[in-house]
Amino acid sequence: MRPVSSPFSQHINWGLGTLAVIYFLHFSRVLGLWDVPEFSGILNGFLYVPELLGAAAIIWKVSQRTAQPGVWRLLALGTLLWGIGQIIFASLQLLSGILSAADPFFLALPFCFLLGFLALERQQPSLVGRAAWLDVAALVVSAGAYLWYFLLAAQLLSSPTDLLSNAITAAYPLSDLLLLTLLLARAWRGSAWVQRRKAWSQPDWSWTLALGMTCFIAADLGFSFLTLKNAYTGQQWPDTLWPLAMLLFAGAAVQASRQAPALAAPAAAFPASPPRMGLQTMIAPYAALGSSFALLLTLQELHSAQNQGVLVATFVVALLVAARQTLALRDLETHQAKLEESRTLLHHQAYHDPLTGLGNRAQFGTLLPQLLARGEPVGVLFIDLDDFKFVNDALGHRMGDEFLKEVAGRLQLAAESMPAGPNTAAVSNHCIRFGGDEFLVLSAPATPEHLHQLGARLLSALRDPVLLAGQTLQVTACLGGVLSGPDAADAETLLRRADLAMYAAKRSGKNAVRLYTPGRQDHLAARRVLLETRLRGALERKEFQLFYQPQQERGGHIRRFEALLRWDDAELGRVSPAEFIPVAEAAGLMVDIGDWIIEEACRQVAEWRQLHPERRVAINIDPPHLMRPDFLPRLQAVMTRYTLPGEALELEVTERLLIADEDQARDTLRALLELGIDVAVDDFGVGHSSLAALLRLPITTLKIDRAFVSELGLESQDDLPNQAAAYKVVQAVVALGTALGLRVVAEGVETPAQARAVWVLGCDAIQGYLVGRAVPPEQIPAPPAVQTTPAEPLPLVPGNRWGTLG
């Protein structure tokens, strides 16, 4: 559809204006404001004929620009034929009731309107549902009763007995009844009413068309009544309504052409809304029945055909209303059934997780109080999957969802099939997806033994690998359990304690079950919260300090120092790094702390190198910090500020970096080597060691973990098997480092026997209490006056255990 162009719109407006002028000339003549007696006979029938033909021409012209061109062409045809009928009628000067050549043309208008409305119904249905059809039918029959009583019966009884004449006589009121039916049908169109409420400023052609049909019906009925009483003169009020109706038809067509783009929008583009009961739907059947009975009550007797017709019509209306109400009852039952289904569905959706089908948090909040109200001990198991993030990162979130569904199914099956103990009643277990990769299992009644057995059963159910996208994934989880009691009788307390127990399982090595231990875990949780709170202000309070532990090379020289973080809190005192560093990592504080460590270590080594240019400092870097895009620029900025060459620094990373993101790690480590900075893998052998990553990643140093070194040099016969195994591991790591051209450092060397063992195995340097403890920089001793000989297996200075300082 094309919008009405400006020139075209001007022509149409001029045409409508001309028709309006013709109508007002005719209207003023009917009112007696002017007349030309010599041409009175001609003016009576022909004055408004140009308006009729002009209206038909305008409707036809704009129909191609509407959303329903075929409908408007039928209306244009009906208007044209009615105008031709008026020409014939005026020419013959025949009155209604006698067969005339004009009758077919007059009756063609309702027929064309009927065809047009049927075509419109296919595009924009007005009567949706059988109830609407019954309502309209009842109203039409009720109106027909009045039409029969006041007009049609009198016309038929007083007209000639010729069948054709009677048919023509009845056709006019029946055609008006047909137009009334179409008008009522359009009143039931819900979308038109909704559209009108949304945009009152834009006129709707439906209203203009309905107003024109109303005028036409009133004119026809008025003409019939006047003709029945032999009072029609051709210059009365019906003659003002016919041309007004045609003018309104033309105006409706113009409005439709200008609304075509909006009306042409496909209905499928909008979601279907449920039918609403409008005012007409509620009062229609009762209005039809009431008006019919009101007419029936005015009748004095029922013997005449006129009165019997009213009785029959009232009976038909009653049957239609009864059918309508029966249908309404059936619809009500259907709607109630659908409403109940919807309620059931909504209840299920409100209390179940959409992904796994398990209960959700809302179900947990409802179910737990019900179980506690029974007075029996309730067990809560908090389940957290280990390293689920790697599944999402490696396979994507869709595969992650499939993984969660598989885990949920296993948990539910294991919990529901858990057998009751020999001396316990039947136990009910309920699985809940609490969020993300966290699940809950509620069990009642429960005992500590039962809760531990249930946790072990759940872990066993997760033991089998999961196959997703061609990948075999091993599922592990940490479970924390708690029993309700006098001091744990609400959801918040039980969840907190189960969560504490779960984290205790994580600290113990993961893939384990732990039950809540009163007192101890509360103390640990409170301690953890206090540590995090104090850590957040430690940098501002300048509570951190770097201690330096030396590394001794094979020739006895000490040129390298490892910077180790220490924390002296004003309230907590000296806090062990093993305690506060995991808290700082979990709280996301290690990036800021790491930046401070780099700044302070670079400042210190720059100060040392003024007197000892061969000294180096090794700095421990958290893998997430190292992988940040701004890590290298910030490091280079600090080195530039202190005029440090790359050879003055060594960065130590843990084995987590080797498996986290190998491609990004390779790029970052290569950039560090290009700056001249050495890279060491700390605590090698105790984590997720990746030998393949060692081949691909640019590193310079391997540091053997103290767990292996501590087993060397033991004198007890009982420790010989462990010592032999540790010896072979260290030997293998040294051989691996030598083969890859890496420098190998043994950590945790505390005795001369351990030192001799690692020297013999080929280590390049040692670090530990035997060489020196970590101390503040001001406590590092000055280089000794005595020099050791390179031939000594372990060059040491008696008394202070520091070798040859560089």
Image (cartoon, rainbow, N blue to C red):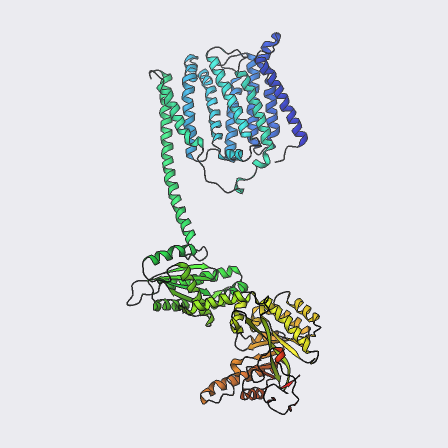
Nearer to us in this view, 39 or 595: 595
Q: In this view, does 542 lie to the left or right of 725?
A: right
From what the image shows, is residue 686 above or below residue 19?
A: below
From what the image shows, is residue 351 above or below residue 618?
A: above
* Residue 199 rendering spot, x and y as whole percentages: 56, 34
Q: Can residue 114 be seen in this view?
A: yes
Nearer to us in this view, 537 or 422: 537
* Residue 532 rendering spot, x and y as whole percentages: 52, 66
Q: In this view, does 792 lie to the left or right of 163?
A: right
Q: Is residue 476 visible?
A: no
Q: Is residue 468 left or right of residue 371?
A: right
- The image quadrant of residue 747 is bottom right
Q: Is residue 375 left or right of residue 226?
A: left
* Residue 38 rendering spot, x and y as whole percentages: 62, 7
Single out the residue that lies furthest toward the top: 38
Single out the residue that lies furthest toward the left: 423
* Residue 593 rendering spot, x and y as whole percentages: 59, 68
Residue depicted at x 47% and y 86% = 721
Quadrant that contains the C terminus: bottom right
Quadrant that contains the N terminus: top right
The number of discs equals 0
Nearer to us in this view, 501 or 104: 501
From what the image shows, is residue 17 above or below residue 722?
A: above
Nearer to us in this view, 262 or 54: 262
